[in-house]
Image (tube, grey):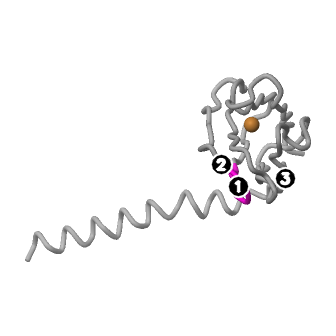
Amino acid sequence: MRGRTTAIVTMVGAAAFAAAPASLAAATTKGKTRKVSVNDNYYGPSKLTVHVGDTVDWVWSEDETDVHDVDLKTAPKGVRKFQSDPLSAGESFKRKLTKPGTYKIICTFHEEEMKMTITVKKAK
Ligand SMILES: [Cu+2]
């Protein structure tokens, strides 16, 4: 009996702890979402300026036939690198950018020609 009570209290505590960071993030984040189209074989636009907290949403064109990906090649210090799966027509991939600096993105399938630069500025 005593053991069961302890378990319930622990679970409630864990749930409250887990919920706190999410609501905190929602309250402090007013970022915009910026769309980038993924095409054969380029990102549109290839140069983008956003602010800290904005989300970049890469959207694979509907008439797209080739597979492409989004691979963060270089980023400001402390930014965790990311890479999308190889995706095709109609799919999308998004990432929130939370540190200012220059982000260089490439498509690993078309590394020579398919790249983009995102400049993330400090929030105003
Ligand atoms: Cu590509």
Q: Are marks 2 and 1 in contact (CB under 8 Å)?
A: yes
Question: Gap in Å between the C-alphas at discs 2 and 3?
Answer: 19 Å
Residue hosting label 2: 87
Percent from the top left, x then y, of residue 29?
Answer: 74, 56
Q: Quadrant of ligand 1?
A: top right
Sequence-wise first label, 2 or 1: 2
**Nearest to the observer: residue 57 or residue 102:** 57
Looking at the rendered structure, the kind of residue marked 1 is Ser
Q: Residues within 10 Å of mark 1 (few under 14, many from 20)?
A: many
Residue hosting label 3: 34
Query: Would you place residue 105 above or below residue 1 in this image?
Result: above
Looking at the rendered structure, the kind of residue marked 2 is Leu
- Foreground mark, 3 or 1, reads 1
Q: Is residue 18 left or right of residue 37?
A: left
**Residue shown at 18% from the left, 74% from the top:** 5
Is residue 88 shown in magenta?
A: yes
- Foreground mark, 2 or 3, reads 2
- The region drawn magenta spans 87-94
What is the number of the mark on residue 92? 1
Q: Quadrant of residue 107?
A: top right
